[in-house]
Amino acid sequence: MTNEDGRKFDLTERTAVFGEELIAFLKQLPVNDITSPLIRQVVRSGTSIGANYSEADEAGTKKQFRNFISICKRESKETKYWLRMIAAAVPDKKPDARALWKEADELNRIFAAIHRNSKDEDNDN
């Protein structure tokens, strides 16, 4: 698959790079009573996106595929929320958090479209 620039579109690589960039960003944050739980939450949800996409890519059935894509969609949405909270907790990191938020939002939109377009033939849910 290629994007509109003609470059190869590799969602496995894109989600992995997102997880790596997220980890690098989180390592820069001050650790205190407020940021510690936020960091734990966003590292779980943000890195889960790529892990679940890898599972979806290897799914044995369409139902399994849709389930993993649904998880990717939820985890990317959750990641947006935690990044917003980190931006509030560490205002000087807001621009970096916002850039990651935008990528999480794009991933969320991609997974939502994949989920919509992968309806099970036997069940339109």
Image (cartoon, grey):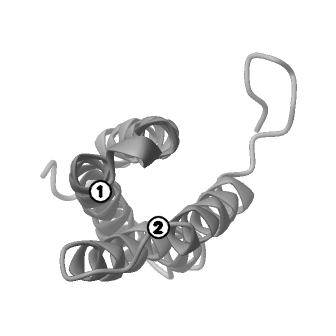
* Residue that sits furthest to the top in the current view: 4
Nearer to us in this view, 45 or 12: 45
Q: Is residue 7 visible?
A: yes
Which label sits on residue 104? none
Q: Disc 1 designates what residue?
A: 86
Residue 39 image point, x, y percent: 35, 75
Say what amino acid the circle numbered 1 marks: Ile
Residue bearing mark 2: 29
Image: 102 above or below 121: above
Circle 1 crowding by C-alpha within 10 Å: few under 14, some 14–19, many from 20: many
For residue 104, say whether it is visible: no
Residue in the picture at 76% in, 38% down: 1
Residue at point 52% right, 78% down? 51
The residue type indicated by label 2 comes to Leu
Estimate the x, y position of residue 3 in percent, counting from the top left. Answer: 74, 26
In the rendered view, tell whether residue 94 sits above or below residue 35: above
Q: Which residue corresponds to the image point at 60% horizontal and 57% vertical from the top-left?
A: 18
SS at mark 2 in the image = loop
Vertical side of 5 occupied by 27: above or below: below
What x and y, as percent, mark residue 66?
34, 63
